[in-house]
Image: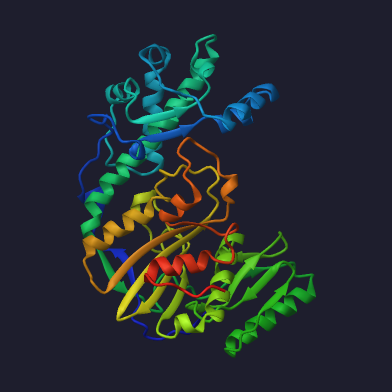
Amino acid sequence: MKNYNKKDLKLKGLRLKAGIDFKKQGPKPELVSPEGHLPSHDKVLVNWYPKLQIQDSRKKASSVRESHSTELNRETFSSYHIAFMDLDYLYFEMQKFKNERSWHNLRLSKEEIARLLTNDYWYELEIPKEELEFDSFDKVKKWEEIALVLLKKYCEKQYLLSKKKWEGPNMEYYKITEKDNNFFSEYKVSVDSNDESMVVKLKQLKDSLKKNKLFDLEFGGLESFSFSQHLYQPLLTVEGEAVKVTPVPLNEGEYNFIQDLKLYYENNEDFFKDKQLYLLRNQSKGKGIGFFEAGGFYPDFILWILHDDKQFITFADPKGIRNHSITDFKLQFYKHIKELEQQLNDKDVILYAFTISNTYYEDLIDTGLKLSKEQMEEQNILFQKDDKEVYIRKMLESIIGEKAVGL
């Protein structure tokens, strides 16, 4: 079920040039200790308190919550802790991690892993002090578990930074067409064949597509709707288990983002009278537009605004961020996309990225780096539920650089 209704718009996308393969052609990254202290925003941050809330007794969980309400305790491993750990086990687990990610060009060494663990200037560990006190051999397994989490996060960060540095100059703009992988030929919808009413509704939807006379439809947990500025129609969302849809239907955050954008677009004709807006849902790995900075990051939506002979291309990603640190690659993507814009050096294309948080600001876990709501907005993190009436306006104002009219 596809209706590509925007012909020859000359919209641009981003991709890696053909024939470029980091694993085969690029340098061989090596997991090594940093030469000196890293700034806080570059460190690996692990908050172990939520883990303890799940694993520990009610008494300990209570004490964890009390600590959480003030300031989280920070600890580091010492040579004392490392002496108890099984470095062979850690090395083989890291080899396993490397193989699972298919990072065949990554070089690991047991000596460097040991060196990393004896240095504390590349990570910050939030954990109750007593968790690193040796009072039983059971603690050692926990320390190894924590060490692996730290090592994997640091390894991923270093590998992806190396990949970014090498691949960045080999990115290019290209023209989006109907043959782009982000478009698909059909939805596959599965329902109980015994439910005749649902089968009838699906046939109605299919017939409306053939006749190019779409209408919004809601039944049995399936909702089909249109947004005139989305590059294909219809869009589907599903609630419950009665209906199965492929490709994956919109989740709640994605659905709300489109509805909010649609409402703003339809109610602000004056703002858009000299601008053209288009939206496209970005598919996942292998088909959509992805970025290496965040471990194979595929933002949920691509938004184009054509204005003053320029293309403002924005990657918008509705997501829950309750457990995310502000240093997370995906939350920091707004900076990486501007670096890429400079590298590509096309004066007619301006790139942006926004995280659309469907977590209330007050529900964010304070990992010790929690920013104010205003500071997070400065980092292009907008709050869908807190600011339902205005977050779309805030995003558009940031993109175009002019005041938009409120709803």
Which one is in front, 74 or 371?
371
Q: Kindly identify the residue that appears in the image at 59 percent across and 32 percent down.
A: 69
Query: Could you tell me which quadrant the N terminus lies in?
Result: bottom right
Q: Could you tell me residue 88's position as x and y percent?
A: 37, 20
For the rendered model, the colour scheme is: rainbow
Query: Could you tell me which quadrant the C terminus lies in?
Result: bottom right
* Residue 93 is at least partly visible in this image: yes
* Residue 18 is at least partly visible in this image: no
Q: Could you tell me residue 27's position as x and y percent?
A: 20, 44
The vertical placement of 19 against 184, above or below, is above
Residue 111 falls in which quadrant of the image?
Answer: top left
Relative placement, left or right, of 103 versus 28 is right
Q: Could you tell me residue 387's position as x and y percent?
A: 57, 60
Which one is in front, 400 or 168?
400
Q: Could you tell me residue 406's position as x and y percent?
A: 53, 73
Q: Say how many tags the image has.
A: 0
The vertical placement of 247 against 178, above or below, is above
Q: Kindly identify the residue that appears in the image at 39 percent across and 11 percent down.
A: 80
Q: Kindly identify the residue that appears in the image at 28 percent across and 25 percent down.
A: 112
The vertical placement of 256 against 78, above or below, is below
Q: Kindly identify the residue that appears in the image at 46 percent across and 44 percent down.
A: 371
Relative placement, left or right, of 210 versus 175 is right
Residue 44 falls in which quadrant of the image?
Answer: top left
